[in-house]
């Protein structure tokens, strides 16, 4: 897809590329999203989101994707002033709708499962089962709402803030209650370090690498909202932590959880750190060396991947890396094991992402990138609740997009681990940018997709975080050189164009003068020729009158001699007389031939000679004209006949003018005429 809207601003000729300002790009994204099929912006009190162009359902996933996307645009792309008061109220209304949904229906799998299945298995009035993807996205939205309220971007009521706080606490309690141990146990345990992750549903005892990554990703939002982030200069919010802990204690008193942590925020942090450590240790032998399945078994080579129907093995490298980086396991390694171990870890993570990207590019070259660039959540029938497993085993929910996760992983490794720029991240960004649809900031292979659009926009924002910190200054310096080079080129170009314009102007003036001179000389020449023609006409008339008398006398004499020769048969005609005799014979025969040919015309014997000629076909007239011209040419002027410039107007009264002209041209090319006719005798 060829898109006019681009992130890149300028040339890629230098080491670092200059990108357009993030807020400018973000404003375009907002406009495209709010006017697309994914957003029903005319809803009275909130934005309503379609999950995709083809699946026009919202559910908790559509709500959470849409809310998070708009919050990202307003906050991370600095678009607060770009949102009108009406749009801000609608965004708050969308937060309220997300709250209403989880209060009434829980963290379900809507819109993928039908309402009856969702209500039966996930409604909070019935049980405590939750879809981890819905929980993590919703929890991140509520954390985002808190940050935006504190920053003055959105203003929530006190009641709504308290409700969001309670649901963040409830989400943390569910995650702590359902973390999986190495032996398959669930829930928080004191002094325990064998946590290995989460499955797609609460109650699962089998770890899913994607959903483990999803929880660790949400830990990053917990860190940015309350625990603090040194790299992003976000301070710890003790007040909010205290509000969360109080809400969690109230929920524990209501017996909503099977296990209870003394402090849920602290417990969640410890669990995530432990999960990151165990994830790294499990997959460390593979990272940056070979691809692997979630159970740790290795994939031999790229050919094995290319023959699969759908494979998450490239994504598994990304998940494992992000699990480590999201929970800051690298900082723990530096503190506990030193700089060498820290550098080794950073190299392994970087190599894993680079290997993934290179394999993706190769598969893309083969036209097989679709085998690895998506992952779909599936549900196992081994869930403790057999009915859940049976009802959901056929569902496939798109949960991951490889290209966007490569950007996110690269940006996070550079920001938090290696801390030096890599040009290749811009090349990955080109792939994401090229997959947006129809010159709009909307993404998907098969119609617009809300989840993929959110992932792509968030990845672009992650890129800008990296770019503004590590490359923008270099890019501006490089592009300053380019600008200076361009300015020098443009100046030279302008000078050259000016010289060309001056030369062209002089050329036009000279050409105009030459045309004028030519016109004047031509006019004089034409006038001279016309005068000459007038004079020649007068002279011709005078000569013609006199020549006619002389010619008649001479012709009578010649004819007399020819007649005498024919009668007596004695003597020999002079060459001149013989030439005239032959010419007269040819001329007479031409008329006889024409007359004979016209005999087929009914009534010809009673017609005048000119009427006979009317009946002669076009071909016959050409023949007759040719003979007549040859004869007159010989009689009048043999040299003129050879040159083909005879002017014989008398023939045009007998023959068609066209035939005379054609005959003149034809005969001039055969000097001496037809030899057979030359030998005709009178």
Image (cartoon, rainbow, N blue to C red):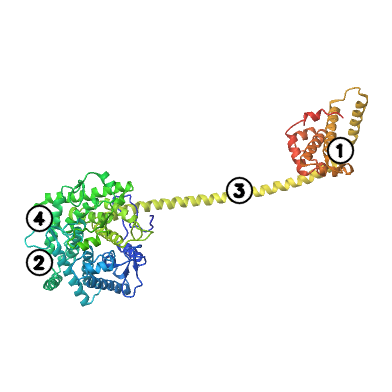
Q: Which mark is residue 245?
A: none
**Contact between labelled residues 1 and 2, with CB atoms less than 8 Å apart:** no
Residue at 35%, 70% in the rendered image: 41
Which callout, 3 or 2, points at the residue further toward the start of the chain?
2
C-alpha distance separating marks 4 and 3: 89 Å
Placement of 188 over or under 303, stated as above or below? below
Placement of 123 over or under 629, stated as above or below? below
User: In the current view of this chain or complex, which residue is farthest to the left?
Assistant: 191
Q: Which mark is residue 547?
A: 1
Question: Which element is circle 4 on?
Answer: helix
Judging by the rendered image, the residue that carries numbered circle 4 is 335
Q: Which mark is residue 261?
A: 2
Question: Which element is circle 1 on?
Answer: helix
Placement of 422 over or under 169, stated as above or below? above
Question: Which element is circle 3 on?
Answer: helix
Which callout, 2 or 4, points at the residue further toward the start of the chain?
2
Please tell me whether mark 2 or mark 1 is closer to you in this view.
2
Please tell me whether mark 3 or mark 2 is closer to you in this view.
2
C-alpha distance separating marks 2 and 4: 26 Å
Res. 46 image quadrant: bottom left
How crowded pointer 4 is (Cα within 10 Å; few <14, some 14-19, many 20+) is rated as few
**Residue 141 position in % (x across, y down):** 23, 67
C-alpha distance separating marks 2 and 1: 140 Å
Which callout, 1 or 4, points at the residue further toward the start of the chain?
4
Judging by the rendered image, the residue that carries numbered circle 3 is 514
Res. 72 image quadrant: bottom left
C-alpha distance separating marks 1 and 3: 47 Å
Residue 539, can we see it? no
**Contact between labelled residues 4 and 2, with CB atoms less than 8 Å apart:** no
Task: State the residue in front, 634 or 143.
Answer: 143
């Amino acid at each position: 897809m060829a898109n006019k809207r681009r992130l890149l601003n300028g040339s890629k000729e230098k080491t670092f590329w200059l990108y357009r300002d993030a807020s400018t790009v973000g404003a375009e994204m907002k406009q495209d999203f709010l006017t697309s099929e994914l957003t029903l912006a005319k809803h009275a009190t909130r934005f309503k989101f379609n999950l995709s162009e083809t699946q026009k359902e919202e559910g908790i996933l559509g709500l959470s994707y849409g809310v998070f996307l708009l919050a990202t645009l307003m906050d991370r792309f600095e678009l607060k002033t770009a949102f009108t008061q009406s749009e801000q109220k609608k965004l708050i209304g969308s937060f309220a709708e997300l709250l209403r949904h989880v209060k009434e229906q829980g963290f379900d799998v809507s819109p993928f499962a039908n309402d009856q299945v969702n209500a039966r298995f996930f409604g909070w009035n019935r049980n405590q089962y939750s879809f981890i993807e819905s929980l993590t996205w919703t929890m991140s939205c509520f954390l985002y709402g808190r940050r935006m309220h504190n920053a003055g971007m959105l203003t929530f009521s006190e009641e709504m803030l308290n409700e969001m706080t309670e649901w963040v606490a409830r989400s943390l309690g569910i995650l702590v209650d359902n973390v999986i141990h190495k032996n398959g146990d669930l829930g928080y345990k004191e002094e325990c370090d064998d946590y290995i992750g989460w499955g797609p549903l609460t109650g699962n005892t089998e770890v899913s690498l994607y959903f483990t990554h999803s929880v660790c990703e949400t830990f990053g939002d917990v860190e940015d909202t309350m625990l603090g982030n040194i790299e992003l200069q976000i301070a710890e919010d003790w007040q909010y932590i205290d509000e969360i802990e109080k809400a969690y204690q109230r929920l524990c008193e209501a017996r909503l959880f099977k296990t209870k942590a003394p402090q849920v925020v602290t417990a969640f942090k410890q669990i995530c750190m432990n999960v990151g450590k165990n994830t790294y240790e499990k997959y460390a032998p593979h990272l940056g060396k070979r691809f692997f399945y979630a159970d740790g078994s290795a994939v031999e080579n790229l050919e094995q991947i290319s023959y699969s129907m759908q494979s998450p093995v490239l994504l598994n490298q990304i998940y494992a890396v992000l699990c480590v980086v999201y929970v800051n396991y690298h900082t723990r390694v530096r503190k506990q094991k030193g700089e060498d171990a820290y550098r080794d870890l950073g190299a392994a993570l970087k190599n894993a992402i680079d290997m993934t990207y290179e394999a993706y590019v190769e598969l893309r070259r083969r036209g097989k990138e679709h085998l690895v660039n998506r992952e779909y959540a599936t549900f196992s029938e081994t869930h403790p609740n057999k009915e859940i497993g049976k009802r959901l085993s056929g569902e496939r929910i798109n949960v991951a997009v490889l290209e966007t996760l490569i950007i996110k992983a690269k940006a996070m490794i550079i920001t938090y681990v290696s801390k030096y720029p890599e040009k290749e991240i811009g090349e990955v960004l080109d792939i994401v940018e090229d997959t947006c649809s129809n010159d709009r900031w909307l993404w998907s292979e098969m119609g617009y997709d809300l989840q993929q659009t959110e992932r792509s926009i968030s990845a672009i924002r992650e890129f800008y975080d990296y770019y503004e910190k590590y490359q923008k200054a270099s890019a501006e310096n490089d592009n300053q050189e380019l600008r200076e080079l361009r300015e020098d080129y443009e100046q030279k170009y302008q000078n050259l164009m000016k010289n060309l314009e001056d030369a062209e102007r002089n050329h036009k003036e000279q050409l105009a003068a030459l045309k004028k001179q030519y016109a004047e000389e031509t006019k004089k020449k034409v006038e001279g020729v016309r005068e000459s023609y007038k004079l020649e006409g007068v002279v011709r008339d005078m000569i013609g009158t006199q020549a006619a008398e002389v010619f008649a006398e001479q012709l009578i004499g010649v004819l007399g001699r020819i007649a005498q020769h024919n009668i007596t048969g004695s003597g020999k005609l002079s060459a001149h007389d013989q030439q005239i005799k032959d010419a007269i014979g040819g001329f007479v025969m031409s008329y006889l031939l024409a007359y004979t040919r016209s005999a087929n015309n009914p009534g010809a014997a009673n017609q005048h000679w000119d009427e006979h000629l009317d009946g002669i076909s076009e071909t016959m007239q050409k023949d007759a004209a040719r003979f007549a011209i040859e004869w007159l040419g010989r009689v009048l002027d043999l040299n003129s006949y050879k040159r083909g410039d005879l002017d014989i107007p008398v023939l045009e009264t007998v023959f068609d003018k066209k035939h005379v002209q054609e005959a003149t041209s034809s005969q001039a090319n055969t000097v001496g005429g037809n030899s057979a006719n030359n030998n005709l005798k009178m």
